[in-house]
Image: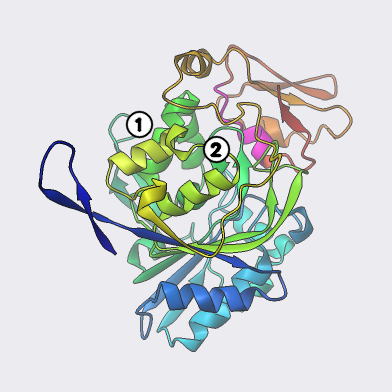
Amino acid sequence: MPVAVMGEGVDTYKEKIMHRVMIHPASYTSCREAVDRAFELFPQNIAQKKVVIKPNVLRASTAQEHIVTNPALLRAVVEKVETLSPARIIVGDNPGLFSYGDNENSFEKTGLMAAAKGYYKNLGNTTQSLAFHPDFMPEVVVSKEIMDADIFISLPKFKTHGLTVMTGAVKNSYGILPGAQKARLHRIAGTPARFHEVIVEVFRLRVPDLFIMDAVVGMEGNGPSSPDLRHIGLILASDNAVAMDGVVARMMGLDPGALRFLQKAKAMGLGDFDSQMVQIHGQMQVLTDFKLPPLGGEAIAGNPMIQELMNNKTKVRPKADPEFCTACGACIDQCPVQALTMEETFPVVDANICITCFCCQEICPEKAMTLT
């Protein structure tokens, strides 16, 4: 809804948009109630439309690891959309960093394939090129099904992220890029600060129409592939990613204005995280003693000391934990700059090459890569 805001030192008013975020109690057995409420608050003109539903599918894992959007939420959203008579439903994502073939395996193992109820499609099989930000790449290839969708529904997961501090509604759109581009953009960005810029540039290629977040069981600590799980018992929803991520940041104990990707998204007119501009339907509570990644919520633009740390990349590095590492080599295969090598039976990072993209940590099936 529009609200009138008095300008400083003037008698005129300027109109801003009040964003809304739903916070609804839920479990995985009762999340359909929250989904119904989300569609009441944020109605979509779905009848006879093509609807693409994108969960967060980082990699092949079990649902019990809570690395991906839970299958129960995906199923609830699919079944809700079925009742609204769309012309066509597609469920998909582009997990992994290099191979389009990661898609089916990831959906099967997580249980998302069954939850998709036959609507799954490999979004890497049909693509189109789009102009991109010239500072990074002149153009990118994206999933054509997403670009052609009449309604695009994003199902992010409530998680931390070693590179962007948190991952949520904005970051979930990074999966519209199929295959190796995700890793190439990590490499081209070069620093965490520039990667914050990249994810917003990708997000704005096709802004989703509705966001429904799995916050029943969230992830804290060394995300986005961490064993540190946190029962939260909520489903969040919004039609604006910046507002939703602002609420998530506050729940984690962060100042959303300190996160570079939210600063950029707000500056580009993609939404607002200011608490005065966000109306919450439900009750928001800050999670006590919430564990953040090693950057501790300080990977921000306004702190010169942390900026220097990020740009020089002298402190935070991935390191394999010998207690969990099986020397499978997945981290070496997935590193976009070949910064990892196997020494005897243990992967070791070359600090002079590493760009701190944390792709190795995201893809490790044993959760053995830590950030130190």
* Number of on-image labels: 2
In this rendering, does residue 178 appear at all?
no
Tell me which residue sits at (46%, 34%) in the image.
259
User: In the image, what residue type sits under mark 2?
Assistant: Leu
What percent of the width, then of the height, locates residue 280?
47, 60
In the displayed orientation, state which residue is furthest to the right: 323
What percent of the width, then of the height, locates residue 257?
42, 36
In this rendering, does residue 332 appear at all?
yes
Residue 240 position by quadrant: bottom left
Q: In the image, is residue 371 part of the stretch drawn in magenta?
A: no
Q: Residues within 10 Å of mark 1 (few under 14, many from 20)?
A: many
Q: Secondary structure at mark 2?
A: loop
Quadrant assignment for the N terminus: bottom left
Q: Is residue 156 left or right of residue 49?
A: right
What percent of the width, then of the height, locates residue 332?
68, 30
Which one is closest to the eye, mark 1 or mark 2?
A: 2
Q: Give the residue at mark 1.
A: 136
Q: Is residue 245 left or right of residue 240?
A: right
Question: Is 304 rendered above or below residue 130?
Answer: above
Q: Residues within 10 Å of mark 2 (few under 14, many from 20)?
A: many
Question: Is 292 rendered above or below residue 80?
Answer: above
The residue nearer to you, when weighing 292 against 176, is: 292
Quadrant assignment for the C terminus: top right
Q: In the image, is residue 358 part of the stretch drawn in magenta?
A: yes
Sequence order check, earlier mark of 1 and 2: 1
Residue 254 bears which disc, if any? 2
The residue nearer to you, when weighing 274 against 337, is: 274
Tell me how far mark 1 sits from mark 2, CA to CA. 28 Å
Q: Are marks 1 and 2 in contact (CB under 8 Å)?
A: no
Tell me which residue sits at (48%, 23%) in the image.
191
- Highlighted range, magenta: 355-362
What percent of the width, then of the height, locates residue 95?
58, 51
